[in-house]
Image: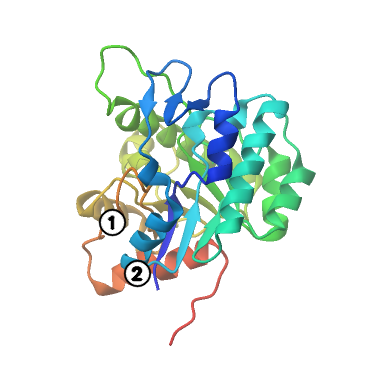
Amino acid sequence: MGVDVHQHLWTPGFVEALRRRASPPRLDGWTLLLDGEPPYEVDPADHDPAERARRDAAAGLDLVLLSLSSPLGIEFLPPEESWPLVDAHHEGALALGAPYGAWAATCLSEPDPDRLAKDLDRGLAGLQIPAGAEPDDRLLDVLTERDLPLFVHPGPVASPPGLPGWWPAMVPYVQQMHAAWHRFHAVVRPRHPRLRVCFALLAGLAPLHSERLIARGGPRRGLVDPGCYVETSSYGPRAIDAIVRELGVDVVVNGSDAPYATAPDPGLGVAARHAVRVANPLRLLGRKETRT
């Protein structure tokens, strides 16, 4: 069995919802238009459900969680604009069937805990929020009540002119995740001690800064938080090894960020590969591993 907790697949309904919009974020054909960014040509093959299913089967994946593209800024739109896109994401992902599941998304400009509860009760895996958002305690309470996790994903950024195309993914995304990791431990965890959380892209490697944190007056190393996970998208064996040395292998989970990247091999041996690809993500999701 293999689990990927982080993929993006724009289903036909979601694509049409983006095309119906008159202002960014929107699609003009397959050209993505966002505020503060140049037009981006989307490859339709990247969002072909049949093609994706073939790739995921070849990769040995039995469970794949689809994620709303938070950099589009959908969660921060006014409710009348946000909800049609969020609902289209949910409807399209749930209609795909196995091996696909999805993270719930929600409107953050006007949080609605009751609506989130109803969405989660349809079988969504947990809630995804953009890294730059201040988590709403009412939404996190809904997760805790259902014993479901939070997934923290990079949010929208503006691309400064004159910089290369990789800049947003390499600089502001990493900075967002770094800040979200420290904010969670300093502010959110004391209020929500039972909440499980997963940070995309190894939390921007924030856990590796523990020595500087201590030097600047932060808490000293203690027990690793077993409910605080990091996923591996866009990193490889060197970064994963460093994170494992800091946090241990039990909180590292497999994520690819497909179609923008592929899932790395942790490079730490068979037992660690099973932990990262199977045992750890299932524990994050509150599911039991079945052995055959």
Classify the position of the N terminus by image quarter.
Answer: bottom left
**Closer to us: 141 or 248:** 141
| Residue at the (34%, 48%) spot, across then down | 233
Q: Amino acid at mark 1?
A: Arg
Q: Against 217, is 159 above or below?
A: above
Q: Nearer the viewer, residue 289 or 175?
A: 289
Residue pointed to by mark 1: 245
The answer to which image quadrant residue 75 occupies is: top right
Q: Residues within 10 Å of mark 2 (few under 14, many from 20)?
A: few
Q: Position of residue 11 (x, y in %)?
A: 52, 46
Q: Is residue 86 above or below residue 256?
A: above
* Distance CA(mark 1)–CA(mark 2): 27 Å
**Residue position marked by numbered label 2 in the rendering:** 60
Residue 249 location in percent, x, y?
35, 62
Residue 114 sits in which quadrant? Answer: top right
Q: Secondary structure at mark 1?
A: helix
